[in-house]
Amino acid sequence: MIIDLRSDTVTKPSKGMLEAMMEAKVGDDVFREDETVNQLETRLANMFGKPSALFFPSGTMANQTAIKLHTNPGDQVVCDKYAHIYNYESGGVAFNSGASCKLIDGNRGMFTAQQVIDAINPEAYYYSPTRLVEIENTANRGGGSCWDFNEILKIKAVCNTNNLGFHLDGARLWNALVEKNENTKQYGDVFNTISVCLSKGLGCPIGSVLIGDEAIMKTAIRIRKVFGGNMRQAGYLAAAGLYALDNNIDRLVEDHKKAKEIGQMLSKLSIIKTVEPIETNIVIFELNKNVNENSFIQKLKEKNIHIIGMGTNKLRIVTHLDYTDTMHEKFLEILKNLTI
Ligand SMILES: *Cc1c(COP(=O)(O)O)cnc(C)c1O
């Protein structure tokens, strides 16, 4: 039995999901004739109270499309130093949009409205025009941290005053909604564009959706085409998404509970310096200086537990729907008796 805790993307489609995929009614999506894709897009648009949604093969493509829609070459995007769009999208902001990022030195991937105000460039021809504010909820590198919705509202007010777009990278928004008892509509009210992943905690093999206002989404399909994201009978994939929305959101609380229990066990180990606060399904912890990151990972690997390093002696564990109760018990037992 291999216990894979490297990411919540390692899940495989369940039997129920595969059945839903097999039964999907499909058509050529380039002609907009795939009724399952259309159904998924309509459903997500309605969930967020937005007029428009578009299915994408990846979260990166959905975010990159949003950034392209909000900016012109030379513009600046305000985001956290930990942001996925900045760190893990292969320099796409510059490559695809010719834009730059103004990084905020936030706290666990989150920042304040005042920090946004301070990051906006004054209007002068020698500055890069600030055009977009981007936040991530939950913040991945921030350890699955959840934003305070009041701060989001304050940032929205700053965006309105300064005529800035507001984009949410909601790859793991589902985790935040479940943990904080929030709803999709309140997010739809605030953001111009929102990307959500179906292939993280929700367990789909592929798929993200960009949701947004009519005017800005009008050219989204053209940008997706330019980025190479046209799909044909994608309804087989969209069916997985619909299944996930029906079956896999509420259960995320289980992943959060397990992550917290892992964190409690880790904090008892003498080889561990700190465990970062755990709010959702991500556990980030730091080893003592005298413990080598790679030997720790290797030690667990010998016991069929897979986790990943983040550099600087920090490691990451992510719980997910294929991490069963049995695996959880076994992992806690192994941790308890771990010697390095
Ligand atoms: C995974 C992820 C994405 C999208 O990644 P893809 O692998 O391109 O689907 C975007 N933002 C965050 C915060 C993520 O964790």
Image: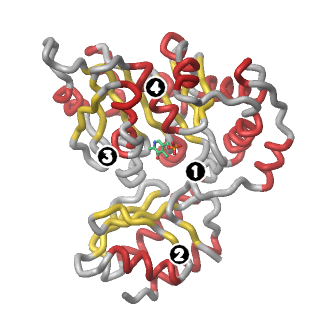
Residue neighbourhood size for the residue with mark 4, other residues' Cα within 10 Å, grouped as few (<14), some (14–19), many (≥20): many
- Asked if labels 3 and 1 touch by Cβ distance under 8 angstroms, the answer is no
The residue labelled by disc 1 is 201
Of labels 3 and 4, earlier in sequence is 4
Q: Residue at x 24, y 81 (%)?
A: 290
Give me the residue at 25% from left, 30% from top: 113
Question: Dot 2 corresponds to which residue?
Answer: 305
Callout 2 amino acid: Ile
Q: Could you tell me which secondary element the residue under label 3 belongs to?
A: loop
Disc 4 marks which amino acid?
A: Ala
Going by the numbered disc 3, the residue's amino acid type is Tyr
User: As drawn, is 313 to the left or to the right of 205?
Assistant: left
Q: Is residue 89 left or right of residue 207?
A: left
Question: From mark 1 to mark 4, how far is it between C-alphas?
Answer: 22 Å
Label 1's element?
A: loop
- Mark 2 or 1, nearer chain start: 1
Residue assigned mark 4: 66
Which residue is the site of mark 3? 82
Residue 63 spot, x, y in % from top left: 46, 32
Q: Residue 112 lies in what quarter of the image?
A: top left
Place of residue 20 in the rendered image (x, y in percent of width and height, measured from the top left): 81, 43
